[in-house]
Image: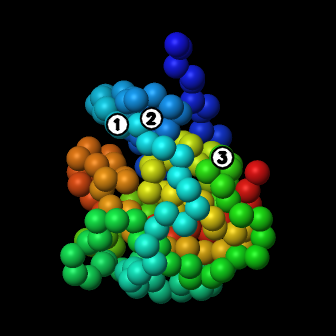
Amino acid sequence: MPRRACPAPRRPTAVLLGALALAAAACGSSSATTANSGATTTAPAVAAPAANQFTSGAVPAADGATDMKAAPTLHAGTGTAPTTLVGKDLVVGTGPVASATSTVNIQYVGALYTTGQVFDSSWTRGQPASFSLSQVIPGFAQGIVGMKVGGRRELVIPPALGYGNSAQGSIPANSTLVFVIDLLGVS
């Protein structure tokens, strides 16, 4: 049976969409090989995320956490990084709900758990990002599913649901990632 091709990202972003080692896997193959900056990465297939597949819990501090008119400033996590997806709604939205098959329009900041160093941000590019949840790392997609438009959510994504043992640009291998995501729209 031929493999189903994944759609191209609508607006590629530096790290989040540019290093999609797991994106092809989400399209239904048992594994996927993706070229990225001359390196080849094999990623396991992942199932479509279900709603609320994260554990509510402690997340690193974020200055400006509820001010959705500006990018929050993320701090390093404290203690041992979680090994499961952890999330917390900073602002609860009231609009339509994101599903596993949604295309989302978001603002986000991504940082390393250990240092708080930002590796990607739609805020610094001056425009939101828009893409299908099937095109991103599993923890990112799972963390957005069930979120309502108008909300802001902080996620802590363990390596197994991120980039695993592969380095991606300024993200070292086996990194736990922190994202603050504002859901602006779904389709």
Closer-to-camera residue (53/92):
53
Which numbered disc covers residue 101? 3
Q: Position of residue 106 (x, y in %)?
A: 64, 61
Q: Amino acid at mark 1?
A: Ala
Q: Amino acid at mark 2?
A: Ala
The reply to whether dot 2 and dot 1 touch (C-beta < 8 Å) is yes
- The image quadrant that residue 171 belongs to is bottom left
Left or right of residue 101, residue 60 in this image: left
Which numbered disc covers residue 25? 2
Q: Position of residue 45 (x, y in %)?
A: 41, 37
Closer-to-camera residue (47/4):
47
Closer-to-camera residue (104/117):
104
Visible residue check, residue 110: yes
In this figure, which colouring scheme has been used for the structure? rainbow
Hey, which residue is sitting farthest top in the picture?
A: 1
Q: Which residue is mark 1?
A: 43
Closer-to-camera residue (49/103):
49
When the figure is inspected, residue 41 is found, relative to residue 73, above or below; the finding is above
Q: Position of residue 73 (x, y in %)?
A: 46, 79
